[in-house]
Image (spheres, rainbow, N blue to C red):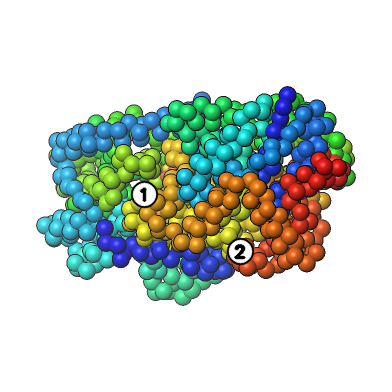
């Protein structure tokens, strides 16, 4: 992994302030959050109509993902064998650079000059678009959100709603410029018209691209199949129209059987968009056979490690269960105060706060494991029961063990624990502290500027009581 | 029944009245309450910051001090989570301390859960003229499943009516060190909480964790709201105000 490319995650704290003050961004985010939360809640509640129970399904989904992770090598072997038998080529990539090399090589072998894409997070991990462009191959993002983000020269800020950080006004300005027309006044009723406009432009790309690049939501081992879940139909255009289809996925995306896939599908769309099922579910196996009306002549699976294998058997293995539904970020108060770009890498929100340090190096993302209030809304909604706050806490522990936290913080914690281990001293320190706080408050019951926690009192008053500790008052009362 | 009241460091330092209110309330419920002398910090700040050995040291100290009581009651969801859920984890593979941690954990209760679930107490002595709204603290709600107990108790308080605010389960943005490290982000989050509180126009916002309450009160005041009272549930249930 190229460290320099990922070091953006270093600047979380600095960027967070700017994002909080960005009025346009805040407007976009405040609109989006209740939609996400409300739709998921409805989708989960609707499980009862089918006689299903959320907790039971979550346990079953967790178990399916754990079963794969216990014997990942075996399931990968089975997938590879079945995929080859169905006529696909299976390649392996260790990191982002290898992904780029493999894709460019496949493209060159087939004389590709343009590739349509439907969202693949792995290609973001690999910075594939830049690499393709540098090799003279034009990548065209075809998911509406990704298309917008690509026009703006940005990266996605959410794993299922890549342009959630943008307002309609911003998108309209982009479209007017790119599609060569005057800017119009737009509101949410115009969204279908804007989507149609983008589709019109994309249609020509669908028809002329020689290669389609997608990710896969799951790889099904027993049949060597890639499962693709989409809502816009463009996934089908990308996987069936071009003569070559390249699927790029992480090695952890395997599930054993079609039956397992069906179980996971009960939770994936509901967790992501609240839908009982997404508009399109494609199961892609092998290549176009004689008599088939469509499909690629060549299918290539690129199975990527990029830091995943190292998590097997580690305290972070649970994170590999992730099915990329986005529910954790949709329910995260921190994510919805900042948007995804503050997190500095491909994966934002709680899952990104765990994945980014693990994939790019703990020392390259020091703030992220701390970017959580510990409220555990993420853990409660995660369809595969990943204990996200505990994984972040574990990362903090590792930062401590490796001496990566500032010495002042480590010293303060040590001193606090040392004092707390000695009750008499602790009482004395607490009494002094209570007096000091009272003195700072000047009898007003609140401190407006507190030098020990300046960021706290920048936004609020620190309420303080009488200058006496509980234990002090209690002891006095007992004596009377 | 010998019961230990565990007074959290925040209550000790920042708002002793919550400790005394808890004491009065438990006594009103007929308990013999003891405040163990050597108690200090449960180790939660060290644990969440990633200092395992400090957390273990403080956990051992707390276990030794508290294990002889029939119950340990804590006016805080977040510290209760530490004793109930984290202590057994810390000593999961420790043959000596593991059983002691687990035995203690079973007897630790958050104040309202203890009153409602263990004592089935329904006659809080407090009085409150007017409407309150309840903020569900994250740890109490999601780690301990405390939802009905405080509401059930509040509704028994003479004169009090309960008006739910929108998104009462949303985090207030405190998160201990989070609000110190990421002050601006935390302010943004607590602002949404303040707006929810303002939208119901209650006389007081009530909660079970002093950390959240200080965060909410601090922001309400900074926003210019000088009238909405911010109260710990023990203060409302206990009534009176003598120390
Ligand atoms: S961590 Fe859980 S909630 Fe978050 S994206 Fe992954 S599966 Fe979804």
Q: Nearer the viewer, residue A286 or A382?
A: A382
Ligand 1 occupies quarter: top left
Residue A232 to residue B7: above or below: below
Q: Which residue is mark 1?
A: A233
Q: Nearer the viewer, mark 1 or mark 2?
A: 2
Residue A381 in sight: no
N-terminal-most mark, 1 or 2: 1
Q: Nearer the viewer, residue A311 or A177?
A: A311
Apparent side of residue A375 relative to residue B233 in the rendered image (left or right): left
Who's the residue at 27% across and 51% down the image?
A306
- Answer with the quarter of the image where residue B234 lies: top right
Who's the residue at 70% across and 48% down the image?
B11
Number of numbered tags placed on the structure image: 2
Chain letter of disc 2 in the image: A
- Ligand 1 lies under 8 Å from the Cβ of mark 1: no
Check disc 1: other Cα within 10 Å, few if <14, some if 14-19, many if 20+: some
In the picture, the quarter occupied by the N terminus of chain B is top right
- Answer with the quarter of the image where residue A465 lies: bottom right
- Residue A185 location, x and y as percent? 54, 70
Label 1: which secondary element: loop
Q: Which residue is mark 2?
A: A453
Q: Are marks 1 and 2 on the same chain?
A: yes
In the picture, the quarter occupied by the C terminus of chain B is top right
Label 2: which secondary element: loop
Residue A313 in sight: yes
């Amino acid at each position: 992994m190229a460290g320099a490319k990922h070091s953006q995650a270093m600047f979380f704290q600095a960027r967070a302030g700017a994002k909080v003050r960005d009025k346009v961004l805040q407007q976009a985010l405040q609109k989006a959050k209740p939609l996400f939360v409300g739709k998921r809640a409805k989708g989960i509640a609707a499980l009862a109509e089918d006689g299903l129970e959320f907790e039971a399904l979550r346990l079953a989904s967790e178990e399916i993902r754990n079963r794969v992770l216990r014997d990942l090598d075996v399931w990968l072997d089975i997938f590879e064998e079945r995929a080859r038998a169905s006529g696909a080529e299976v390649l392996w990539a260790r990191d982002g650079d290898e992904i780029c090399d493999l894709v460019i090589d496949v493209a060159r072998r087939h004389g590709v000059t343009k590739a349509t894409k439907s969202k693949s997070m792995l290609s973001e991990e690999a910075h594939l678009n830049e690499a393709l462009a540098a090799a003279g191959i034009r990548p065209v993002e075809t998911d509406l959100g990704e298309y917008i983000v690509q026009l703006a020269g940005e990266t996605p800020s959410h794993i299922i709603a890549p342009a959630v950080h943008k307002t309609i006004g911003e998108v309209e300005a982009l479209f007017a410029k790119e599609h060569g027309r005057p800017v119009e006044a737009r509101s949410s009723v115009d969204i279908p018209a804007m989507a149609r406009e983008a589709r019109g432009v994309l249609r020509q790309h669908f028809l002329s691209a020689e290669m389609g690049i997608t990710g896969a939501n799951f790889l099904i081992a027993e049949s060597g199949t890639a499962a693709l879940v989409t809502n816009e139909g463009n996934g089908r255009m990308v996987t069936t129209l071009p003569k070559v289809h390249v699927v790029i996925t992480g090695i952890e995306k395997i599930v054993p059987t079609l039956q397992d896939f069906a179980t996971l599908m009960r939770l994936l769309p509901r967790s992501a968009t609240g839908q009982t099922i997404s508009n399109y579910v494609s199961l892609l196996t092998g290549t176009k056979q004689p008599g088939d009306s469509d499909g690629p002549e060549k299918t290539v699976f690129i199975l990527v490690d990029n830091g995943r294998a190292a998590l097997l058997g580690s305290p972070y293995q649970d994170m590999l269960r992730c099915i990329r539904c986005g529910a954790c970020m949709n329910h995260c108060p921190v994510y919805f105060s900042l948007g995804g770009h503050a997190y500095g890498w491909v994966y934002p929100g709680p899952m990104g706060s765990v994945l980014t340090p693990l994939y790019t190096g703990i020392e390259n993302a020091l703030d992220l494991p701390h970017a959580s209030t510990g409220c555990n809304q993420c853990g409660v909604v995660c369809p595969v029961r990943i204990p996200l706050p505990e994984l972040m806490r574990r990362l903090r522990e590792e930062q401590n063990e490796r001496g990566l936290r500032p010495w002042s913080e480590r010293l303060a914690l040590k001193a606090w624990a040392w004092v707390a281990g000695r009750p008499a001293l602790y009482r004395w320190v607490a009494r002094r502290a209570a007096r000091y706080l009272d003195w700072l408050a000047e009898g007003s019951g609140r401190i407006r500027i507190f030098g020990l926690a300046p960021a706290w009192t920048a936004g609020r008053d620190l309420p303080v009581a009488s200058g006496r500790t509980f234990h002090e008052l209690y002891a006095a009362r007992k004596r009377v | 029944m010998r019961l230990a009241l565990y007074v959290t460091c925040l209550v000790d330092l920042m708002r002793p009245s919550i400790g005394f209110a808890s004491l009065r309330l438990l006594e009103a419920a007929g308990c013999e309450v003891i405040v163990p002398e050597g108690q200090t910090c449960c180790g939660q700040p060290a644990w969440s910051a990633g200092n395992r050995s400090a957390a273990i040291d403080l956990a051992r100290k707390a276990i030794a001090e508290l294990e002889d009581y029939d119950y340990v009651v804590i006016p805080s969801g977040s510290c209760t989570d530490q004793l109930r859920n984290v202590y057994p984890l810390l000593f999961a593979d420790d043959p000596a301390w593991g059983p002691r941690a687990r035995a203690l954990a079973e007897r630790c209760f958050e104040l309202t859960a203890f009153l409602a679930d263990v004592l089935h107490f329904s006659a809080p002595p407090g009085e409150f003229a007017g409407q309150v709204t309840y903020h569900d603290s994250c740890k109490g709600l999601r780690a301990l499943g405390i939802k009905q107990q405080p509401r059930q108790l509040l509704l028994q308080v003479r004169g009090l009516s309960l008006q739910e605010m929108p998104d009462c389960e949303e985090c207030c943005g405190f998160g201990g060190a989070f609000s110190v490290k990421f002050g601006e982000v935390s302010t943004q989050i607590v602002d949404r909480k303040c707006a929810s509180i303002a939208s119901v126009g209650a006389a007081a916002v009530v909660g079970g964790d002093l950390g959240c309450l200080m965060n909410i009160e601090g922001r309400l005041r900074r926003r210019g709201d000088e009238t909405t009272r911010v109260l710990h549930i023990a203060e409302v249930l206990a009534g009176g105000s003598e120390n």
